[in-house]
């Protein structure tokens, strides 16, 4: 039996609507004599990352914990903090192809939500990137208190979109999130780049 056509779209932020230039972190790491990739490795370690994704820690406190973990590598807390601050000043870039897709979908009457594991800095990031008025709803894990790929996260997202799961199309660049969305009853597509947009437009049939 074929699925119902999606009438709402839920898109991931990092890796889909927002992209990051890896050269920025690499440049900071070179400047401070750090091992390549260490900033992301520390920040994304689950023990530091999980609390901030469910709102148990602020973005600022998370970055302070990253600086603390980095201090042995640079030998000076102030220098570690400076490295983290310089790294964090870059807030990524909007993928213009994805933004155009979001605008097309909304113009066609599709409700579009941002479904992201994010921190309390998300609203400021959306404003800085000019995205505040580009989405119908924003479902931030740190505000919800549960993160993808939990079924409860997707239940909250569908409620925010005022759309049953079977009518929501979810797009994410992580396999676990895609699998979690499918378990929750959503249609889900694993994002690999702008070449996927042709398929997504067809799936929405607008």
Image (cartoon, rainbow, N blue to C red):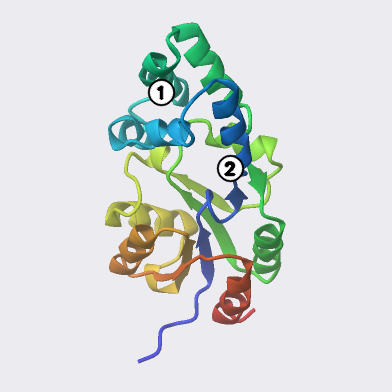
In the image, taking residue 173 as reference, residue 92 lies left or right, namely right
Q: Using the rendered view, name the quadrant where residue 155 is placed.
A: bottom left
* Quadrant for the C terminus in the image: bottom right
Please identify the residue farthest to the bottom as the structure is shown.
Answer: 1
Q: Identify the residue under disc 2.
A: 22
Camera-side residue of 62 and 109: 62
Residue ID at (53%, 56%): 113
In the image, taking residue 162 as reference, residue 201 lies left or right, namely right
Height in image: 156 above or below 145? below
Tell me where residue 132 appears, x and y as whole percent. Answer: 66, 43
In the image, taking residue 48 as reference, residue 103 lies left or right, namely right
Q: Identify the residue under disc 1.
A: 66
Residue ID at (55%, 20%): 32
Tell me where residue 152 appears, x and y as whole percent. Answer: 29, 53
How far apart marks 2 and 1 lie (CA) works out to 18 Å
Height in image: 106 above or below 25? below
């Amino acid at each position: 039996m074929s699925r119902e056509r999606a009438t709402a779209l839920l898109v991931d932020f990092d890796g889909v609507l927002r992209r990051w230039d890896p050269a920025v972190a690499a440049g900071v790491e070179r400047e401070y004599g750090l091992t390549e990739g260490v900033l992301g490795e520390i920040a994304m370690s689950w023990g530091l990352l999980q609390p901030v994704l469910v709102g148990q820690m602020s973005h600022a406190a998370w970055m302070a914990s990253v600086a603390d973990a980095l201090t042995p590598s640079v030998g000076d807390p102030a220098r570690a903090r400076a490295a983290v601050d310089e790294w964090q000043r870059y807030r990524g870039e909007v993928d213009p192809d994805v933004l155009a897709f979001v605008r097309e979908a909304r113009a066609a009457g599709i409700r579009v939500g941002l479904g992201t594991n994010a921190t309390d800095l998300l609203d400021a990031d959306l404003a800085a990137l000019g995205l505040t008025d580009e989405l119908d709803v924003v479902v931030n894990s740190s505000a919800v208190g549960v993160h993808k790929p939990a079924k409860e996260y997707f239940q909250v997202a569908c409620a925010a979109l005022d759309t049953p799961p079977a009518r929501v199309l979810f797009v994410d660049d992580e396999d676990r999130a895609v699998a979690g969305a499918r378990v929750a009853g959503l249609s889900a597509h694993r994002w690999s780049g702008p070449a996927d947009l042709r398929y997504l437009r067809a799936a929405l049939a607008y």
